[in-house]
Image (cartoon, helix red, strand yellow):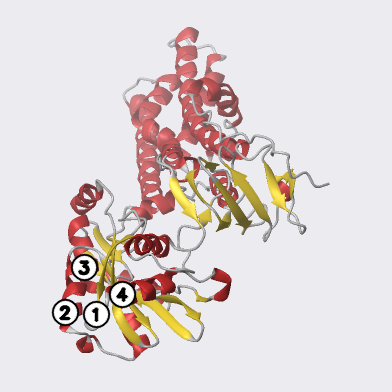
Amino acid sequence: MNMPAIKPAAAKAPEQAKTAISALWRPALVQAFVKLDPRQLVRSPVMLVVELTAIFTTVLCFIPDNVVPTFVAAQIALWLWFTVLFANFAEALAEGRGKARADSLKAGSEGLSARRKMANGSFQVVPAANLRKGDVVRVEAGEMIPGDGEVIEGIAAVNEAAITGESAPVIRESGGDRSAVTGNTRLVSDWLLVKITANPGESTLDRMIALVEGAKRQKTPNEVALDILLIGLTLIFLLVVVTLQPFAHFANGSLPLVFLVALLVTLIPTTIGGLLSAIGIAGMDRLVRLNVIAKSGRAVEAAGDVHVLLLDKTGTITFGNRRCSAVYAAPGVNGRELAEGALFASLADETAEGKSIVEYLRGLHPQPEPALDTLTAVPFSAETRLSGVDYQGRVYRKGAVDSLLAFLGQQRAELPSALSREIDKIAQSGGTPLLVCADGKLLGAIHLKDVVKPGIRERFAELRKLGIRTVMVTGDNPLTAAAIAAEAGVDDVLAEATPEKKTGAYPSRTERRSSGRHVR
């Protein structure tokens, strides 16, 4: 049944995870007793020894002893049981935090509905769980986006704090690299038409839940080494305590077994042995609260060995919302001819940069514009780094300097000196120069400004203190890349990078291992 006027039911925003101790201590206390099963404690040999000594001491409480009063033996037994239970409780509490985080993520998608576009153009309200890849939905201000998708129409501000941790809303629009939206994020303003790109169970949120629930307590190499050390110390102290009784008999004396058991537990490293697993789980949970998903403690430990960090420029180091600030005509080209060529080359460009060029030129040189359906669009490609239109037999293109020159079959040295100087000035100022041509004729350059995120330089300085080199990877020309890198404070830069260059920017894994360097 079609209901174009009906608004979808309000979706529940992702709830704050109930990770407070007040909400988790009861199930954690129950799990502390469940974990007394020796089959579970075998993962922690030290605590297994403590449990065995607690059982042994409890048995001794029922055996009359003239040397040790029963209440003293009972006190020792109680403390031993408390030690085991406390270690189990700490581990169960840490595990409970992770489970609560997964439950809170699930709660965000419960009851979520969507306004799905039908074949006849009307909209039908359906549960978000019924959406499939390829469906088109309409989302309005205040509503939750029902699933991962691509914006095909509209522009709006989206609050992605539940997924990315970014408190400020981000702009999402059709075309370019800002068209992807994530399910269970809230639209702050305007409206969007979104094409769903993930089936149920395949979305970003579903993968996050799967990672949180499936995070395995695989022991890291350091934990394994520490376990070996703890087991070794336990065996040594066990041997020491066992030999005390024969020495006492040799001296015509005797040591109460209860005291020997208490001495053993005092000597062996019970504290670190009992809390080692809980520390690892708590560390992973802390990362989750920072919107970082760790599949295992091994992954966290490996991250500590990283020496080089590769970072994409757009959206990571800079805001990624470059805007047109000026145009420069080539010698022999008047301003109106350049404006027409740049405007036509950008009319079908759905990226933020393309829209800013159109907006700028409309104010600079108002002129009649052709209808979009009369244009043959050539969308931007990461491979060619060109975009434009074909209109009435004419070819309009704009793109990166080296890419457009290659399209024209020219070399950088063939550029007019005046235009080349303007391009260098744009690049040296940290802007991005684009060239424009029409029917094989170079018309001029466009100046796009980009803004470096505040505080990024200080963060890179902190990474440098940790011994981590930062490398900015960008498709910009070397001068622009160098200017932004200097402003941001990165250690190195890889310019004019295509997708293939980005993946092969640094040596292979085998080469990195042989040199002892880790790259992420």
Picture coordinates of residue 356, whole percent (x, y): 38, 60
Please report contact status of discs 4 and 3: CB closer than 8 Å, yes or no. Answer: no
Placement of the C terminus among the 4 image quadrants = bottom left
Give the number of the mark in front: 1 or 4.
Answer: 1
Q: Quadrant of residue 442?
A: bottom left
Give the number of the mark in front: 2 or 4.
Answer: 2
Picture coordinates of residue 105, whole percent (x, y): 57, 39
Note whether residue 379 is visible. Answer: yes
Vertical side of 117 occupied by 500: above or below: below
Q: Amino acid at mark 2?
A: Ala
Q: Residues within 10 Å of mark 1 (few under 14, many from 20)?
A: many
**Label 2: which secondary element:** helix
Q: Which residue is mark 4?
A: 496
Please report contact status of discs 2 and 1: CB closer than 8 Å, yes or no. Answer: yes
Q: CA distance from mark 2 to mark 1?
A: 8 Å
Q: Which mark is residue 426?
A: 3
Q: Which residue is mark 2?
A: 418
Q: CA distance from mark 1 to mark 4?
A: 23 Å
Q: Which mark is residue 57?
A: none
Give the number of the mark in front: 4 or 3.
Answer: 3
Q: Which residue is mark 1?
A: 330
**Label 3: which secondary element:** helix
Q: CA distance from mark 4 to mark 3?
A: 16 Å
Vertical side of 33 occupied by 287: above or below: below
